[in-house]
Every structure is written in C-alpha cells, then in structure tokens.
C-alpha cells in the first residue's frame, strides 16, 4: 500500500456526502495512481476513462441535486478481464480475444454500475482464468505489490494486485478452483467466492461452467460484503442463478460469533504446508477460539482426491467451452488455404501453452473409451467430496483451513512444472467442487513479510455467516496476527 489514502465504500460515501471530494476528483485520483504504478505491476490491461468519468458525472449530478446515493456511489472499481464489458476490450488474458469488444455487459457489471460504482478498467489474469500465478497471461505476469519479485497468485492476480496496491477500492474476480481466494491470500486482501448460483454468470466468459463464480476482492470484509450484496441474486439470463433471497450482508456483519462451531478438518493440516503458513493459520484458529467459536475436529475423507477430480472436470468443461474460438464468428482469425488450416493456425497461435494443455487433457477425458474411466469417475468423486461438506455442515457452522499451502512464490519459480502449480490449489478446489461459499481473509505475514490467508467455508447460500466470522476475525486484529 502506498502512502495514498486507502478509501473504502463507507469513506467514499461519507466524503461525497460531505462534499469533501467529488466522484470526478476521486476518479482522477485513481487514474493517477494507476498511471504511476501500473507500468510496474501490470495489473490493468485496459482502462475505460470515458465510461468512468460519465458515471462519475452522473453521481456528482445526484449529489448536486440532493438525491439519495446508491450503495456503491462513486466507488472506483476494477473488473477481471474475463467479465464482459460493453464497448471495452475483453481479452481473457488471451491473444485469441486480443481485439474482442463485447456488445453487452455482464450481469454483475450492470449491477455494479446501477449501484453507482465507477468502473476504471479491466484487470490482467491468467489466460481464460487457467492458472494460480497470473503467469499464463498473454500480456505478461502481474507483480505482487507486497513483494514485487513474486507472483500475486492467480488467476484473478490483476484484481488482487490492484486492490492491494490501492489502484481500486474493490474489484471483481472469478473463482473456478481458487482464483479469488488464492490471489487474495497471496496479496494480503480479503477475497470472497460466493455459493455456486449466487451471482449470475451472464457475461462471464466460460472456463468451466459448473464451477465458475464471480465474486469480490476488497480491503475489508465490510467492502466485500457491500459488493456481494449488489451483485447477488436471481437473473433471468442465467438459469443457474438461483432464486434464493439475498440477505442484507452488511446488517448481518455485527452478529456475535460466540458459540458458533468451527470445523477444523484434519486433512487440511497434514504435511505439505509451509511452516510459516501453518503457524499463522493455527494462530488464526486460536484467535477464533478466543472470540468464543467452538472448534470441532473434522474428517473430510475424500479431500485427497480433490486436485485430480478438479483437473479432470475443469479441463473437460474447458475443452468444450473453448471450442467456440474457431476463427469464424469472433476473435482472432488467421487465414489458411483450407478451413482446417484456418482453424489450426488460429487456435495454434491464439491460445497459449497452458490453455492448449487443458484442451488436450479435457478432450482426452471426454473421448469415447475414456469417458467412463475419467470424466464419469471424476463426477462421482465430486459427489463424494460434496457429501463430505454436507456431512460436516451437519455438525459445524463453518470450516476453517489455510487458503494456500505456500505464500507468494517468485516469478518463474513454478512455471516449468505444471503439476507443482496445480498443487497450489489443494485447499481451494474442494469448496469449488462442492459449490459452497468461502472467503480468504488476511492472517498475518511470514517472517519474510509475505501475506498468509485463512479460509472460512460455509454451507451453500450461507455467505452471511462466513462474512460474519470473517468480520469478527478482522475486528479482533486477525489481519496482523
Ligand atoms: N488455479 C486453478 C486452475 O488453474 C483455479 C483457476 C480458477 O479458479 N479460475 O484451474
């Protein structure tokens, strides 16, 4: 964080209301910060000042006329570049969509603007959200603002870095297997994955449709709750956006946590965790106990199969979803003398190596003869993992785990070995497969000064209690434990 003021949703509202600053001035301030820091961080891929200033003018007009302000009035925000924005280039971190300008806004983007948010631009990410370090972007890696020789985590690395560096008050990320929570943990900011179906995926460019979710990154639990409240709810454009009523997340934040039962699954505290991460997460659990939460030891016996299951299902869905980039309808086209040659050249040059690896893995898992052995088996294990969660939530209100087994690693340190990279997702993919909500909150730093994240998982549509525990943790000083 620079010495510049760290704005929050509430402080923006108060300053606008008291006419200490205008939405236009605030927008200018954020663009100045971006101009200064983005050349090094590479968190933003595109800026949309025209759109941002037009929105700022609308908010300033409301203030001048004394009209009531919507919940995110004037709040400068950033949007991960896999989320469609009308008239603003949306690349998915890929060459194949380098010049793609969506003709419509994602539902979540529409909700944010209706709520008064000022959208500054689009953030860098792993290509089609595939990765855990942001090094798979066709537009270069993002640097972690806390330690600039290190990765910010992925795939929503640009959103996490932008928020952590004070280049946006909050941001949207997407989480398929950990991509909001893990970069949140590595950059030291809260990141929330809502329940599958809580936020419409309309306009979210698909990676793995049964897993993809949109959610907020912010500098406080309160701000994450404010953004979630705005984007959550039913959307007729997405049949998986559930018709479950959305509670007032902000009002629920102050509910007491005393007496809540927190599950500590043995499988998440086995070997393989960095000792400094372990020490902080264990201290985090102690803090929750001091707040009156009751620890319950849990067994979640199918945890070991989660990475394999996730990488079969996610790649299978990706191979199908990415078939649409064929050079015909939109996106890159490289001409060839035959149709097949055009496909090959377009996809060969348009996609990066990780995306190609996943298309091949997924196509293989779905092919006749291997479908039962891989894809169907993975679907069955997914059900067992979801059942582990269902049973656990019969006994506990929330589950506490580390977010990532390691703190931010150095740029380039893991790129040679894809499997090593996949293992970074070990604590996050389970909740993704089970469809439950989870937040990563900062939980101190390692002796080397690298942020550690604590993950709080809740039952389906139980975001309110996840946020409530996260809020109590934050208030009790958990971030600097
Ligand atoms: N790191 C995981 C992957 O590479 C998760 C990505 C995500 O959540 N989008 O698939």
Image (spheres, grey):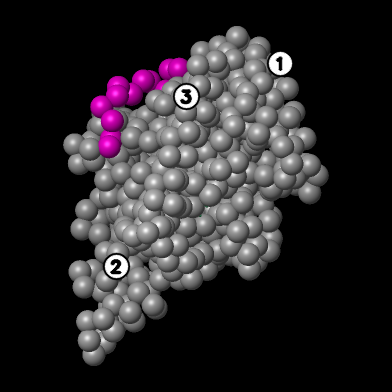
Q: Earlier in the sequence, mark 3 or mark 1?
A: 1
- Does the Cβ of the disc 1 residue fall within 8 Å of ligand 1? no
Q: Which residues are magenta?
A: 240-252
Find residue 343 and report its horizontal and vertical position in percent: 28, 77
Up/down of 335 relative to 270, above or below = below
At mark 2, the secondary structure is loop
Circles 2 and 3: CB atoms closer than 8 Å: no
Is 249 within the magenta? yes
Q: Earlier in the sequence, mark 1 or mark 2?
A: 1
Q: Give the CA distance from mark 3 to mark 1.
A: 27 Å
Q: Earlier in the sequence, mark 2 or mark 3?
A: 2
Few, some or many residues within 10 Å of mark 1 (<14, 14–19, 20+): few
Circles 1 and 2: CB atoms closer than 8 Å: no
Name the residue that disc number 1 marks.
290
Residue at 27 percent across and 37 percent down: it is 240
Could you tell whether 275 is left or right of 429 in the image?
Answer: right
Name the residue that disc number 3 marks.
390
Find residue 58 and report its horizontal and vertical position in percent: 26, 42
Quarter of the figure with the C terminus: top right
Circles 3 and 1: CB atoms closer than 8 Å: no
| Residue 407 appears in the rendering | yes
Name the residue that disc number 2 marks.
325
| Residue 224 appears in the rendering | no
Residue at 67 percent across and 52 percent down: it is 408
Few, some or many residues within 10 Å of mark 3 (<14, 14–19, 20+): some
Find residue 435 and report its horizontal and vertical position in percent: 42, 35
């Amino acid at each position: 964080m620079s010495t510049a003021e760290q704005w929050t949703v509430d402080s923006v509202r108060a300053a606008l209301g008291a006419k200490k600053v205008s939405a236009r001035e605030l927008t200018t301030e954020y663009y100045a910060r971006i101009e200064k820091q983005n050349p090094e961080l590479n968190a933003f891929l595109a800026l949309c000042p025209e759109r941002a200033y037009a929105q700022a003018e609308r908010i300033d007009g409301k203030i001048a006329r004394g009209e009531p302000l919507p919940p995110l009035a004037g709040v400068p925000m950033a949007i991960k570049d896999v989320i469609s924005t009308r008239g603003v280039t949306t690349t998915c971190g890929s060459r194949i969509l380098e010049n793609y300008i969506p003709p419509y806004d994602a539902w979540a983007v529409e909700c944010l603007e209706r709520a008064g948010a000022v959208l500054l631009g689009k953030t860098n990410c792993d290509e089609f959200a595939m990765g855990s370090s942001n090094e798979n972007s066709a537009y270069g890696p993002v640097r972690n603002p806390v330690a600039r020789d290190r990765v910010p985590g992925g795939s929503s690395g640009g959103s996490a870095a932008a928020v952590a560096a004070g280049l946006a008050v909050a941001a949207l990320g997407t989480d398929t297997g950990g991509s909001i929570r893990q970069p949140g943990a590595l950059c030291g900011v809260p990141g929330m994955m809502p329940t599958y179906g809580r936020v419409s995926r309309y306009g979210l460019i698909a990676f793995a449709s049964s897993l993809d979710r949109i959610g907020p990154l912010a500098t406080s639990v309160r701000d994450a709750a404010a953004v979630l409240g705005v984007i959550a709810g039913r959307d007729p454009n997405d049949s998986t956006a559930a018709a479950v009523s959305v509670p007032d997340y902000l009002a629920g934040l102050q509910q007491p946590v005393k007496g809540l039962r927190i599950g500590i699954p043995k499988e998440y505290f086995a070997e393989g965790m960095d000792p400094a991460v372990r020490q902080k997460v264990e201290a985090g659990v102690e803090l929750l106990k001091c707040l009156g939460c009751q620890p319950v030891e849990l067994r979640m016996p199918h945890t070991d199969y989660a990475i394999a299951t996730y990488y079969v299902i996610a790649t299978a869905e990706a191979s199908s979803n990415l078939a649409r980039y064929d050079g015909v309808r939109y996106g890159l086209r490289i001409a060839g003398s035959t149709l097949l040659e055009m496909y090959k050249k377009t996809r060969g040059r348009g996609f990066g190596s990780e995306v190609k690896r996943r298309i091949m893995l997924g196509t293989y898992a779905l092919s006749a003869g291997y479908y039962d052995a891989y894809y169907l088996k993975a679907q069955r294990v997914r059900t067992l993992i979801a059942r582990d969660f269902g049973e656990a939530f019969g006994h506990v209100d929330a589950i506490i785990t580390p977010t990532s087994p390691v703190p931010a690693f150095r740029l380039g340190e893991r790129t040679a070995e894809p499997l090593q990279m996949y293992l970074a997702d070990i604590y996050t993919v389970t909740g993704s497969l089970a469809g439950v909500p989870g937040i990563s909150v900062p939980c101190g730093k390692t002796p080397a000064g690298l942020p550690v994240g604590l993950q709080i998982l809740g039952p389906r549509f139980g975001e309110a209690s996840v946020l409530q525990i996260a809020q109590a943790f934050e208030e009790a000083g958990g971030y600097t434990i």
